[in-house]
Image (cartoon, rainbow, N blue to C red):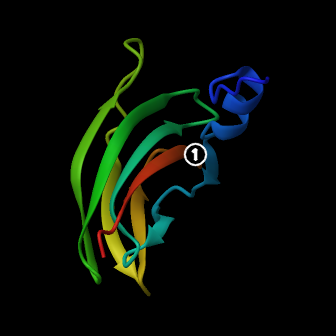
Amino acid sequence: MEFSNSLTPIRGDFRYVKKVFNHQDMFDNTQNYVPLGASADYEHFEIDYVFQLPISGRSQNGVISVSVTSPTAAEISGHTYEFPDSEAEIETIVYTASVSAGIVQLGVEVSGIGENPTFNYRMATISSAV
């Protein structure tokens, strides 16, 4: 007789898929967009991110909550962030949320930092109840 345990290393590892960070290069002095998902399929997004400046080595990490308020509108419902104590805050970053062609987008406006940043992120979603 063989016992089956769903948490054995082989089966447990197979069922657990670690969410890795996605990588997106951005440009200074422009509005950059990160597509999140269809507004009809999801009602909430939690985005863990690390915003990095590759030349100066500065970074900022945080969590952004985006709520879909209607099929044509989304808003940032929460944003917490931190940066290493030895670094100054990167102040010229503005985050927005919008819906374009049915896709929820996170807007990242970067201005006056002098280099092209990278945006590493992973997200969790809450599906629409419909």
Q: Residue furthest top?
A: 86
Can you see residue 61?
yes
Q: Quadrant of the N terminus?
A: top right
**Helix, strand or loop at mark 1:** loop
Indicate whether 58 appears above or below 79: above
Residue at point 40% right, 63% down? Answer: 107
Q: Looking at the image, which residue sits at the far bottom?
A: 101
Q: Is residue 118 left or right of residue 88?
A: right
Q: Quadrant of residue 43?
A: bottom left
Q: Residue at x 36, y 77 (%)?
A: 99
Q: Position of residue 49 (x, y in %)?
A: 47, 40
Q: Which residue is mark 1?
A: 115
Q: Residue 101: x and y, percent?
A: 44, 87
Query: Considering only vertical position in the picture, is 120 above or below 27?
Result: above
Using the image as rendered, state which of residue 91 and residue 112 is in the foreground: 91
Q: Nearer the viewer, residue 118 or 22?
A: 22
The residue type indicated by label 1 comes to Glu
Closer to the camera, 95 or 56? 95
Q: Which residue lies at the image location 63% right of the left edge and 24% below the top edge?
A: 7
Can you name the residue that lies furthest to the front here?
1
Q: What number of labels is visible?
A: 1
Q: For residue 114, say whether it is visible.
A: no
Residue 102 at what x, y percent from top left? 41, 83
Pinpoint residue 6: horizontal percent, then vertical percent.
63, 30
Residue at x 64% of width, y 48% of height? 23
Q: Quadrant of the C terminus?
A: bottom left
Looking at the image, residue 96 lies above or below residue 58: below
Q: Dot 1, crowdedness within 10 Å: few (<14), some or many (≥20)?
A: some
